[in-house]
């Protein structure tokens, strides 16, 4: 498709967009009395309007039923979390019994490593990407030290080639093969938070499995963003947060995936709690743990219902629309944003370098050569919510649920004014 950098053209794309009416499903922050152009759905998604109703419902049940709400609320709390499994399984390409919702992301990665990082004298290494998200680095290092090992020896970081901004799948696969029999675990971000690259999760999972390692994915930037087929790829486990592209609310509950082949096992190493044992016998308060035959076996505590309520509301939206439709719009709006950036680039002296490769989801990471923090501040003051990473990189993630093509056009105009006014 040939794009045009005009308001009319952008509005025409919006008129053709089957998701355009979903804008009304979300609340927008206001700057200068207008809805902002929101590029940070990769950090915290906007609030779906319907989440209020779901939260109010729990508050009402608690107010009117108190403890009886566990069993007699319209959506009883004792199995409330099960309502999320079906919708989530579609988002991540899994069977409903392979997913669960609990805790927060870093906590869940730690818990899953209890099951899937079991170093031996020979097989103890972990492969991850260089400059992984800091929480993941701390998590991996502390796990390694917990097992009495040295992070410098146990953690193998995948480097990019000199002068390149993204990883090459062949290099990743080669490293996996080289580490070979020493490799205990591959654990990486499926979509990199910095450059927005979508890794070839299928090929990497296969490579890791073929040398006998466990393979897990941190899907913080992937869930609700790109097509996932965790079950089909044969990943052992995965975890994600829900407050980025999933729009469930700040710091909200994380999801996990555990491959079907590990479900229902009593002897798998795992930290356990009462919400992981079978419902039928849970309240007999017997001493023996009888794992639920689903990923729920990894749950420890009774879940925070007030957090699950907005997550359920958000999943309803994903269920209505489906990942395929979301991704279709995403590809188009990101391509349009890329086009707008190139157009503005021609009209100003500073130059933009998109460091996100073609294997991408929602995010474009852009090096603004010749620019600095003042431009970022100008954008924010003029209603463009984005984020700035050293050195001079802005990350732009136009989430297909609530960003419009007109937003992309308007962003281009604001960006140009911000650069020219210097
Ligand atoms: C956002 C993000 C996290 C956040 O972790 P929390 O435990 O939810 O605070 C972790 N890892 C990656 C890769 C992320 O992008």
Image (cartoon, rainbow, N blue to C red):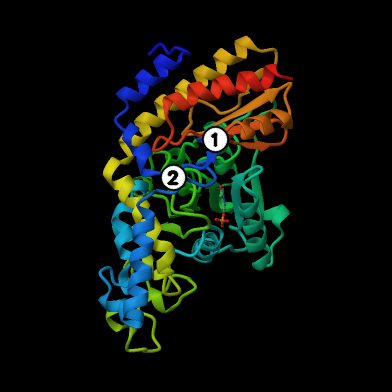
Q: Residue 7: horizontal and vertical position, in percent?
A: 44, 16
Label 2 within 8 A of ligand 1 by Cβ: no
Within 10 angstroms of label 2, few (less than 14), some, or many (20 or more) residues? some
Residue on which the image places disc 1: 196
- Front residue (pair 337, 150): 337
Q: Earlier in the sequence, mark 2 or mark 1?
A: 2
Above or below, 237 against 206 in this view is below
Residue 24, disc: none
Residue mark closest to the camera, 2 vs 1: 2
Residue that extends furthest to the front in the rendered view of this protein: 33
Q: Residue at x 29, y 40 (%)?
A: 321
Q: Residue at x 38, y 37 (%)?
A: 23
| Image quarter hosting the N terminus | top left
- Marks 2/1: CA distance? 25 Å
Above or below, 323 against 293 in this view is above
The reply to whether residue 169 is visible in this rendering is yes
Element on which disc 1 rests? loop
Q: Residue 234: horizontal and vertical position, in percent?
A: 38, 49
Q: Residue 297: horizontal and vertical position, in percent?
A: 39, 70
Kindly indicate the quadrant of the structure image that contains residue 277.
Answer: bottom left
Element on which disc 2 rests? loop
Q: Residue at x 56, y 59 (%)?
A: 106
Say whether residue 198 is left or right of residue 287.
right
């Amino acid at each position: 498709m040939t794009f045009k950098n005009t308001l009319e053209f952008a509005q025409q794309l919006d008129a053709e967009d089957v998701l355009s009416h979903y804008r009304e499903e979300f609340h927008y922050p206001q700057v200068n009395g207008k809805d902002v152009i929101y590029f940070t759905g990769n950090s915290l998604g906007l609030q779906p309007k319907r989440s209020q109703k779901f939260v109010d419902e729990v508050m009402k049940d608690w107010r009117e039923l108190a403890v009886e709400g566990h069993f007699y609320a319209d959506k009883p709390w004792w199995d409330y979390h099960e309502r999320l499994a079906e919708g989530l399984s579609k988002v991540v390409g899994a069977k409903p019994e392979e997913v669960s919702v609990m805790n927060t992301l870093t906590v869940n990665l730690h818990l899953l490593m209890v099951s899937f990082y079991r170093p031996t004298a020979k097989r103890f290494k972990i492969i991850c990407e260089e400059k992984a998200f800091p929480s993941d680095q701390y998590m991996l290092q502390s796990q390694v030290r917990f097992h009495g090992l040295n992070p410098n020896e146990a953690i193998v970081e995948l480097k990019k080639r000199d002068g390149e901004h993204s990883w090459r799948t062949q290099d990743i696969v080669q490293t996996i093969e080289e580490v070979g029999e020493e490799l205990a675990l591959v654990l990486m971000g499926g979509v990199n938070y910095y450059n927005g690259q979508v890794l070839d999760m299928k090929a990497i999972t296969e490579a890791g499995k073929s040398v006998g390692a466990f393979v897990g994915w941190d899907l913080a930037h992937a869930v609700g963003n790109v097509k996932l087929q965790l079950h089909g790829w044969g990943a052992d486990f995965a975890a994600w947060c829900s407050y980025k592209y999933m729009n469930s609310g700040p710091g909200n509950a994380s999801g996990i995936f555990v491959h079907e082949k590990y479900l229902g096992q009593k002897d798998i190493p795992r930290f356990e709690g009462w919400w992981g044992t079978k419902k039928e016998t849970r309240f007999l308060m017997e001493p023996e743990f009888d794992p639920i035959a689903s990923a729920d076996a990894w749950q420890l505590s009774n879940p925070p219902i007030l957090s699950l309520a907005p997550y359920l509301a958000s999943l309803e939206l994903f269920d209505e629309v489906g990942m395929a439709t979301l991704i279709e719009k995403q590809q188009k709006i990101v391509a349009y944003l890329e086009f707008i950036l190139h157009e503005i680039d021609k009209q100003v002296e500073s130059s933009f370098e998109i460091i996100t490769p073609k294997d991408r989801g929602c995010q474009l990471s852009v090096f603004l050569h010749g620019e600095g923090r003042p431009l970022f501040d100008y954008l924010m003051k003029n209603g463009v919510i984005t984020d700035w990473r050293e050195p001079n990189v802005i990350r732009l993630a136009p989430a297909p649920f609530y960003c419009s093509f007109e937003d992309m056009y308007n962003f281009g105009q604001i960006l140009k004014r911000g650069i020219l006014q210097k």
